[in-house]
């Protein structure tokens, strides 16, 4: 009784070393927080693991809303200190001192035993509930914050050698491998510390090794074919796979590169009216999840490219951008009107192609105009050439066209093939004199 009375005045840091290890009171999951508790001599001490995806909450809020039955709480922070391990904050609830910073050795001293530690990506509350003092380290699969389950599930709907199955399984393997790498690296950090780890910390889990899928990557054409099949599906599982790829790398391996927003005020432009007039209604399949996470708007399709378009109620449009143009007709001209448009000699009109990591703009010195210059340089030679990525930045192969694309042309400007070739050749001649 005396000890518990003193707990109201003695900060956790000064609790005495117990004669015997403090009895472990088990673990609970409260509002996503995993709370492990010990009944120490001066009262209950609770060690709190925040949710992996949760934001940081003040210790006073935790004390009031999550762990109100403890005499003191210690919370694992997301940051680290060199030679000290992951940071820990403590708070005494009966008479708050702090919050204040403590060390793992402080916590282990008060408990009379090493403290359990779960690496990042292995803090599964259900697994943590099973832990008991003295239990052996378990080997389990690390979990990434991005759920790879839908990718594996949809892959199972196809034969193993189908491009869609191969594409989805590759991305799923990349995700689970990244989780393993992060958990394994998290454990390696401890080996760099100056003091013996075994005295203060017991590793509750280690990650199941996962082979590196980057050693045998799929060809890009297989990936694009696989995603093309997913895009034609109208089930929610396909949408979840599309969302997972967007979260992972922005849809880097999709058959189209990204989206462009056509603003309502540009509705009357001649080039947009021409392009819009050929759009047709289409079933709302998984492609449209790339354009918008919401289900509003009219589902349309460009019949010349097969790419999706959403028409919104305010006359704005969201359109997919091609990676290359599906035509053999040579470039005739470009139109700078809201977006960059390409017209071919047979009269076809397209949104200018782009890669997922770069778009086409003009009128200033920067990335967008530089990428546009390199695109035009390629299209002058091969209209079906893939759009350049940001890897071209720093290259001097299209300097003549860069001077052109950096010009602040008014919207509605048409630049002919002859003008493009003259701009390219003029800088080439200047560079050779």
Image (cartoon, grey):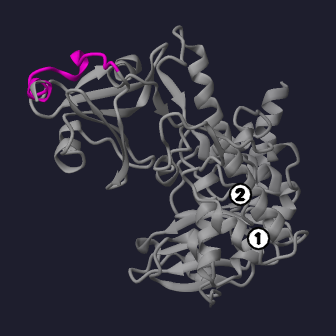
The foreground one among 45 and 280 is: 45
Q: In this view, does 250 lie above or below 266?
A: above
- Which residue is depicted at the point 57% across and 63% down? 339
**Residue 170 screen position, x and y as percent:** 78, 57
| Mark 1–mark 2 distance (CA, rounded to whole Å) | 10 Å
Crowd tier of the residue under label 1, counting other residues whose Cα lies within 10 Å: few below 14, some 14–19, many 20 or above: many
The foreground one among 266 and 177 is: 177
Q: In this view, does 85 lie above or below 70?
A: above
Quadrant of the frame with the N terminus: top left
**Residue 141 screen position, x and y as percent:** 66, 49
Magenta-colored stretch includes residue 346: no
- Which residue is label 2 attached to? 172
Residue extent of the magenta highlight = 3-19
Going from the N terminus, do you reach mark 1 or mark 2 first? Answer: 1
Q: Along the horizontal axis of the image, is 2 left or right of 415? A: left
The foreground one among 148 and 16 is: 16
- Which residue is label 1 attached to? 155
- Which residue is depicted at the point 26% across and 28% down? 90
Q: Along the horizontal axis of the image, is 114 left or right of 366? A: left
The foreground one among 375 and 413 is: 375
Tell me if label 1 and label 2 are in contact, CB under 8 Å: yes
Quadrant of the frame with the C terminus: top right
Q: Is residue 267 above or below residue 109?
A: below
**Residue 205 screen position, x and y as percent:** 59, 39
Indicate the secondary structure of the residue bearing disc 2: helix
Picture quadrant where residue 228 is located? bottom right
**Residue 96 screen position, x and y as percent:** 12, 29
Magenta-colored stretch includes residue 17: yes
- Which residue is depicted at the point 25% across and 16% down? 16
Residue farthest top in this picture: 194
Whether residue 287 is visible to the viewer of this picture, yes or no, is: no
């Amino acid at each position: 009784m005396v000890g518990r009375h003193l707990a109201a005045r003695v900060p956790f840091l000064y609790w005495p070393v117990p004669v015997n290890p403090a009895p472990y009171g088990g673990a609970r999951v409260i509002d996503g927080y995993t709370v492990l508790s010990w009944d120490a001599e001066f009262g209950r001490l609770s060690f709190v693991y925040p949710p992996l995806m949760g934001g940081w909450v003040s210790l006073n809020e935790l004390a009031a809303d999550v762990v109100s039955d403890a005499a003191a709480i210690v919370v694992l922070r997301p940051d680290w200190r060199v030679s000290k391990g992951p940071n820990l904050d403590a708070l005494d609830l009966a008479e708050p001192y702090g919050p204040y910073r403590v060390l793992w050795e402080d916590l282990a001293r008060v408990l009379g035993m090493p403290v359990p530690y779960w690496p990042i990506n292995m803090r599964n509350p259900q697994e943590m509930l099973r832990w008991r003092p003295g239990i052996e380290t378990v080997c389990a699969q690390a979990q990434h914050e991005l759920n790879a389950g839908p990718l594996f599930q949809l892959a199972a709907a196809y034969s193993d050698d189908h491009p869609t199955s191969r594409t989805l399984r590759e991305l799923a393997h990349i995700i689970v491998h990244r989780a393993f790498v992060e958990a394994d690296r998290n454990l390696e950090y401890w080996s760099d510390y100056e003091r013996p780890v075994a005295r203060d910390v017991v590793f509750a889990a280690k990650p199941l090794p996962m082979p590196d899928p980057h050693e045998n990557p799929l060809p890009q054409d297989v990936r694009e074919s696989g995603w093309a099949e997913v895009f034609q599906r109208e089930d929610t599982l396909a949408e979840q796979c599309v969302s997972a790829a967007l979260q992972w790398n922005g849809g880097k391996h999709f058959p189209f590169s990204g989206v462009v927003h056509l603003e309502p005020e540009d509705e009357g432009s001649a080039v947009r009216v021409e392009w819009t007039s050929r759009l047709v209604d289409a079933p709302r399949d998984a492609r449209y999840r790339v354009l918008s996470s919401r289900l509003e708007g009219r589902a349309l399709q460009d019949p010349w490219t097969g790419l999706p378009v959403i028409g919104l109620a305010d006359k704005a449009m969201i359109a997919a951008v091609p990676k290359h143009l599906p035509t053999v007709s040579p470039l005739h001209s470009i139109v700078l009107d809201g977006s960059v448009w390409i017209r071919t000699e047979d009269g076809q009109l397209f949104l200018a192609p782009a890669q997922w990591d770069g778009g086409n703009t003009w009128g200033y010195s920067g990335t967008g105009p530089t990428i546009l210059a390199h695109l035009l340089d390629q299209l002058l030679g091969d209209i079906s050439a893939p759009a350049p990525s940001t890897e071209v930045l720093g290259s001097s192969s299209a300097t003549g066209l860069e001077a052109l694309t950096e010009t602040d042309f008014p919207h509605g400007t048409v630049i002919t093939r002859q003008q493009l070739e003259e701009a390219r050749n003029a800088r080439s001649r200047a560079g050779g004199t």
